[in-house]
Image (cartoon, rainbow, N blue to C red):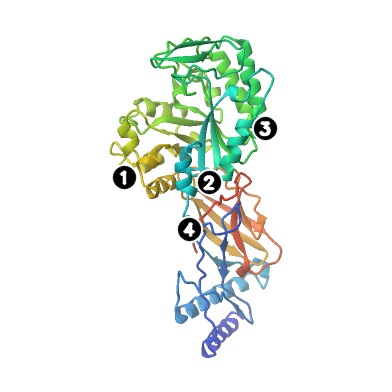
């Protein structure tokens, strides 16, 4: 039977040639964001298959990958032989007859929730850079929401989220209590505070001995999480105490329990926040590694909480010169594999103007490129608000695309009822939200969330009966805003 069917296929193929029939060819596909979908990246697919009476092949001619008629005939014959063998091995059961599906797709833009981050009020850079920026950043004071205890007004938070989403981006918020040189209050009225020198400047500092202040902070984040934990306009939040919420009070004579939270309250606060955010990743500064400020060095339980890290002096001159260097030692303290469950980010160093001006040079500011640093720390995002002043748009885009995740479809096949595919993460960090491979609007039950770099996930989607030539592959996520797409590479 195998020989009879094979000769039938060969005869039919030769008949097609002699009759001037169209040749089969791979269909060139681009995942370049031209899809109308706001939730996914779409690629059209083609496949070659055979039955005992016909050969199914793509009639589309690819401008990206032109094939000669003889090559196309060879491909059809090869596919026919392979498919015939598969059909015989399944004893005629078409549901076991999987055929390879051809797919071409390319990641050509910065992926959602990754990249170089700009402040939300840097409108000139945000407008010029367009979708080369996927994240916006803003500090928030607690009194931006609560000026009188018990009365919450989320208008400013909502406004920032609305504006970022309208520009096709998500927000990163950082709540801070102290900003060197700022004497205006950051907390609700009638809570105790002081004005003290920090970094040589008069600065507002809350009085952390106040149990009322502590209770307010716990209530604040309870309400924030209830309102925003499942909001697709919010990518990440950054938390902490002290200057810039970075876990320090340089030159401020820190006294735990007075001008800086005591370790018992920090422990309560961190456990509380961990219990609140089940969807939105939260992060703290690498400076929290210091036993002078935080309780982490004496609590393995706290270190095991699922929080990310941010480093706000990233790539300064001595950064990571050895394992005992301050920044490097702080990253190591929290664990080299923390990125596997929570994002790593930060901000380019402001130690010197030279750092800012040259941090995205090909060799970085100090003979090590951003790409090399990003790989080392599995960076998902990096605040670079001044980079538009120093670097061309193309360089900012290239640097942004070197962060986070990058998916590749490494195999794709269908039997007309079930689609099987394998997806590999070619990036340097996981995606921290659920995203589902989707065929013809049917989502897989398996998510790509947490797929580690250089790892592959095998996925199977059962559909209504379909022609393998007419399936459409996308990657969908409910955490995207209009205009965002998750792309993928493919060369099948």
For the residues marked 2 and 1, what is the alpha-carbon distance in whole angstroms?
A: 24 Å
Dot 3 falls on a residue whose secondary structure is helix
Near-viewer residue (279 or 365)? 365
Q: Residue furthest right?
A: 464
Left or right: residue 93 compared with residue 402: right
Residue drawn at (43%, 30%) of the image: 311
Q: Which label sits in the foreground, 4 or 3?
A: 3
Q: Quadrant of residue 273?
A: top right
Point out residue 251 in the picture as x, y percentages from the top left corner: 39, 14
- Mark number, residue 362: 1
Vertical comparison of 231 with 149: above or below: below
Q: Which residue is mark 4?
A: 106
Near-viewer residue (361 or 53)? 361
- The earlier-in-sequence mark between 1 and 3 is 3
**Does residue 219 appear anywhere in the picture?**
yes
Q: Are marks 2 and 1 in contact (CB under 8 Å)?
A: no
- Mark number, residue 2: none
Vertical comparison of 1 with 46: above or below: below
Task: Count neighbours of disc 4 (C-alpha within 10 A) and say few if under 14, some if 14 to 19, many if 20 or more.
Answer: some
- Mark number, residue 227: 3
Vertical comparison of 247 with 60: above or below: above
Residue drawn at (44%, 19%) of the image: 180
């Amino acid at each position: 039977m195998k020989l009879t069917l094979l000769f039938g296929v060969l005869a039919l193929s030769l008949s097609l040639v002699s009759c001037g029939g169209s040749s089969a060819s791979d269909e060139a596909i681009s995942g370049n964001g031209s899809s109308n979908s706001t939730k996914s990246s779409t690629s059209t697919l083609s496949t070659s298959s055979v039955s005992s009476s016909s050969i199914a092949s793509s009639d589309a001619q690819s401008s990206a990958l032109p094939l000669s008629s003889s090559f196309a005939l060879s491909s059809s014959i090869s596919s026919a032989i392979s498919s015939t063998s598969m059909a015989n091995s399944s004893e005629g059961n078409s549901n076991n007859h999987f055929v390879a599906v051809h797919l071409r797709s390319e990641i050509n833009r910065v992926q959602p929730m990754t990249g170089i981050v700009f402040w939300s009020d840097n409108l000139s850079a945000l407008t010029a850079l367009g979708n080369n920026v996927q994240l916006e950043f803003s500090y928030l004071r607690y009194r931006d929401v609560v000026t009188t205890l018990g009365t919450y007004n989320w208008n400013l938070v909502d406004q920032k989220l609305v504006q970022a989403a309208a520009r096709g981006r998500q927000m990163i918020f950082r709540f801070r209590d102290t900003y060197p040189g700022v004497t205006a209050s950051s907390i609700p009225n009638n809570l105790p505070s002081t004005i003290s020198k920090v970094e040589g400047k008069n600065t507002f500092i809350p009085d952390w001995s106040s149990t009322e202040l502590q209770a307010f902070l716990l209530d604040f984040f309870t309400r924030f999480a209830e309102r925003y934990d499942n909001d697709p306009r919010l990518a990440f939040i950054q938390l902490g105490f002290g200057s810039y919420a970075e876990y320090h009070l340089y030159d401020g004579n820190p006294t735990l329990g007075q001008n800086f939270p005591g370790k018992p309250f920090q422990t309560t606060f961190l456990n509380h926040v961990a219990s609140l955010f089940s969807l939105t990743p939260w992060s703290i500064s690498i400076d929290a590694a210091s036993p002078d400020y935080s309780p982490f060095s004496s609590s393995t339980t706290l270190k095991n909480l699922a929080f990310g890290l941010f480093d706000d002096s990233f790539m300064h001159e001595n950064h990571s010169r050895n394992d005992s260097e301050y920044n490097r030692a702080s990253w190591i303290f929290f664990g080299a594999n923390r990125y596997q469950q929570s994002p790593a980010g930060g901000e380019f160093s402001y130690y010197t103007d030279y750092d800012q001006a040259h941090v995205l040079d090909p060799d970085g500011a100090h003979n090590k490129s951003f790409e090399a640093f990003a790989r080392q720390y599995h960076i998902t995002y990096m605040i670079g608000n001044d980079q538009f002043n120093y670097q061309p748009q193309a360089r900012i885009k290239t640097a942004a695309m070197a962060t986070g995740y990058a998916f590749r479809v490494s195999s794709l096949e269908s039997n007309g009822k079930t689609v099987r595919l394998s997806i590999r993460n070619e990036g340097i960090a996981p995606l921290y939200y659920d995203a589902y491979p989707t065929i013809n609007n049917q989502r897989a039950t398996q998510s790509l969330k947490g797929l580690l770099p250089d790892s592959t996930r095998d996925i199977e989607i059962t559909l209504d009966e379909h022609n393998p030539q007419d399936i459409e592959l996308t990657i969908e996520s409910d955490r995207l805003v209009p205009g965002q797409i998750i792309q993928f590479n493919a060369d099948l």
